[in-house]
Amino acid sequence: MQTKNSTPNNNVKSYLIKAVQAIGNNKIVRFYVDGFKSMTIGKKLWLIIFIKLFIFFVLLKIFFFPNYLKTNFKNDTERSQHVIEQLTK
């Protein structure tokens, strides 16, 4: 049963705080965090990986994969009808 001061929102916040603290106390997480902190070349390599992922998923999507449904159909019903037709062929 809830008291006057405890609301469902406060209960969720306190649960999330406890969960994050439990994850932070985990030996495996600390192992990887400490390993990442002590990297020298590894940090630069991770930066390159994240830049490549950004290029793959954001820039290529914008320039090479236009929104086919929005450009070729006027409303949602036409779009959904086209998708249904393509899936049932």
Image (cartoon, helix red, strand yellow):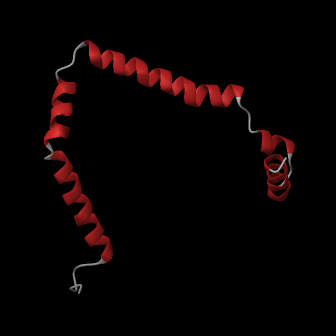
Quadrant assignment, res 43: top left
The picture places residue 14, in percent across and down from the top left corner, at 22, 65
Is residue 81 rendered to the left or right of residue 63? right
Most distant residue in the top direction:
41
Residue at 86 percent of width and 47 percent of height: 73
Residue at 24 percent of width and 84 percent of height: 2
The picture places residue 77, in percent across and down from the top left corner, at 83, 59
How many discs mark residues in the rendered view? 0
The picture places residue 80, in percent across and down from the top left corner, at 80, 55
Residue at 13 percent of width and 41 percent of height: 27
Most distant residue in the front direction:
89
Quadrant where the N terminus sits is: bottom left
Q: Is residue 5 above or below residue 73?
A: below
Q: Is residue 49 above or below residue 7?
A: above
The picture places residue 54, in percent across and down from the top left corner, at 51, 27
Is residue 48 rendered to the left or right of residue 62? left
Is residue 65 rendered to the left or right of residue 15? right
Quadrant assignment, res 44: top left
